[in-house]
Amino acid sequence: MRIGRLVKWVGTGLLWLVIVLCLALAIVPHFLDARYYRGPVSDHFDGERFFNPDGDDGLPVNGFGTMWRYLTANDNRPVWPTHVAVTPAKPPARVDGERMLVTWVGHSSVLVQTNGINILTDPVWSKSAGPWGFGPSRVAEPGIRFEDLPRIDLILVSHDHYDHMDLATLKRLWQRDAPMIVTSLGNDSVMRQAGVTANALDWGGSIDIGRHCGIDEFCIKTAKPVWIGSVIANRSHHWDSRWFSDRNRALWSSFVVKLPKGGNLFFAGDTGAGDLKWADRAASYGPIRLALIPIGAFRFTAGQMAAGSHIGPVDAVEVYRRLGAAHAIGVHWGTFRLSYEGWDTPPKLLAAAERCTGQRGFGTIPIGRTVEIPAYAAPSARPVLPRDALLRCLAAAGAVALP
């Protein structure tokens, strides 16, 4: 009995220590605030901080209350597995031509191999997503062992949250492969602190990508740089912060990778719905063969279907429709517990939403499984299903009751 009380007291003491530490960090902005970017005022930058031009700051409603309930495990959230079995893939060194192979590493980390280049999105190989080793821990190991990861040519980093910008992983990749890293304004400053060089773009900005002489056999044979395509930074609806007081000092974005053959790649990064016009804009850059769209961390109260900063399957299917993508894979779920919903609720709800809308080609894949994406073919017309009608359909199918 005394041991049980002691454990309880120690646990309570540690919890209060964490809370006090968080409060201390929040009230010492002199040490934690930083200006990652300086530039002209725009429709999404006020000269000090970035913002969503379509309104609201993208933060979950009642963020502090949500954090408190999460820390105290007092939110009646569904139980998650402590470990999910993963058989890591061993992708090929390269995939030439229009053929496209995709491996989900976990969360928003995806390896895309096509047109002779290897593209990696928001790479995170660390065991936890947070500063100094704190933060949500992995329930699933990376779908590719780092030592089995082929040489990376291009890395896309959507924003600076710890579950998307893992400086330890980026430093390892930079030292090993010296890839081109593309991100949005201000994030290059954060990466530079770890000795990593990145190309920072504003929304609508683009940069050519290529394979240059001296990097691999392909370029050595041609004796000149070979243009592969370009990366365009596209608007999304989110926010950013590494600490508490540096909020929105750097920009968040989605990306379109224009490829010479087979159609474009779209990576949504981390986003809420907002006005959804960012999806329309991404579609305007040309046909999208594959879209990587987040479907998890959308529930912070029971029954919630979207948060300000995260879309769930209900809005993800509308993003897919607006993109006009031939294929899509749901990411940002099943690796780090960031919210309320059950571990496998996102893929189940996505499948139900696909049935309700009559769409095809948008699903999920297991972590660590390499899949081949079919050649681009223009999708059939996808009629608009109003969100309220979709919710009614999901309710009739029992999907709304998913934990």
Image (spheres, rainbow, N blue to C red):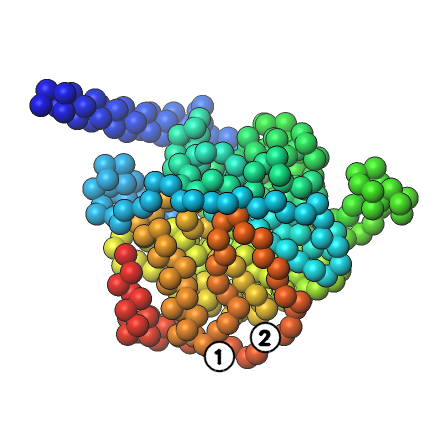
* Residue for point 70% across, 64% down: 262
Residue 202 can be seen, yes or no:
no
Number of numbered callouts drawn: 2
| Position of 387 relative to 160 (above/below) | below
Question: Is 401 in front, or is 384?
Answer: 401
Marks 2 and 1 sit apart, C-alpha to C-alpha, by: 12 Å
Residue located farthest toward the left when viewing the structure as drawn: 1
Mark 2 is on which residue type? Pro
* Rendered location of residue 312, percent (x, y): 40, 59
What is the quadrant of residue 71 in the picture?
A: top left
Question: Is 361 in front, or is 252?
Answer: 361
In terms of secondary structure, where does tag 1 sit? loop
Quarter containing the C terminus: bottom left
* Rendered location of residue 240, percent (x, y): 47, 42
* Residue for point 64% across, 72% down: 377
Image-based side of 129 in relation to 27, left or right? right
Label disc, if present, on residue 383 of the rendered structure: 1
* Residue for point 51% across, 77% down: 382
Residue beneath label 2, please? 379
Nearest to viewer (mark 2 / mark 1): 2
Label disc, if present, on residue 372 of the rendered structure: none
* Rendered location of residue 121, percent (x, y): 58, 47
Mark 1 is on which residue type? Pro
10 Å crowding of disc 2: few (<14), some (14-19), many (20+): some
* Residue for point 14% across, 24% down: 4
What is the quadrant of residue 7 in the picture?
A: top left
